Amino acid sequence: MNYLFLDESRDLISILKVNSSQDYKKLNRIIGK
């Protein structure tokens, strides 16, 4: 489970780095909104 958490964190970081509208929607989906 720790690995899954690390993968999600890495995805969040990459999404924040890109900072595009599409990735922002992806970010909301990952958060579970």
Image (cartoon, rainbow, N blue to C red):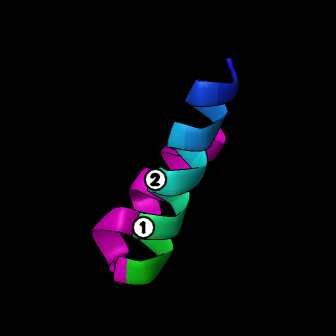
Residue 11: give its label: 2
Residue 4: give its label: none
Q: Look at the image and say whether residue 8 sits in the magenta stretch.
A: no
In-image side of 17 versus 6 (left or right)? left
In-image side of 20 versus 7 (left or right)? left
Res 33 quadrant in image: top right
Identify the residue at image location x=42%, y=67%: 15
**Magenta region, residue range:** 18-33
Identify the residue at image location x=51%, y=40%: 7
Look at the numbered discs 2 and 1 and tell me whether their residues touch, using CB distance below 8 Å.
Answer: yes
What is the three-letter code of the residue carrying label 2?
Answer: Asp
Q: Image height check: is 10 above or below 15?
A: above
Percent coordinates x, y for residue 12 in the rendering: 53, 59
Res 2 quadrant in image: top right
Q: Image height check: is 3 above or below 30?
A: above
The answer to whether residue 13 is seen in the rendering is yes
Prevailing SS of the magenta stretch: helix
What is the three-letter code of the residue carrying label 1?
Answer: Ile
Q: Image height check: is 1 above or below 19?
A: above
Identify the residue at image location x=57%, y=27%: 4
Q: Look at the image and say whether residue 26 sits in the magenta stretch.
A: yes
Q: Which residue is mark 1?
A: 15
Res 22 quadrant in image: bottom left
Identify the residue at image location x=59%, y=27%: 3
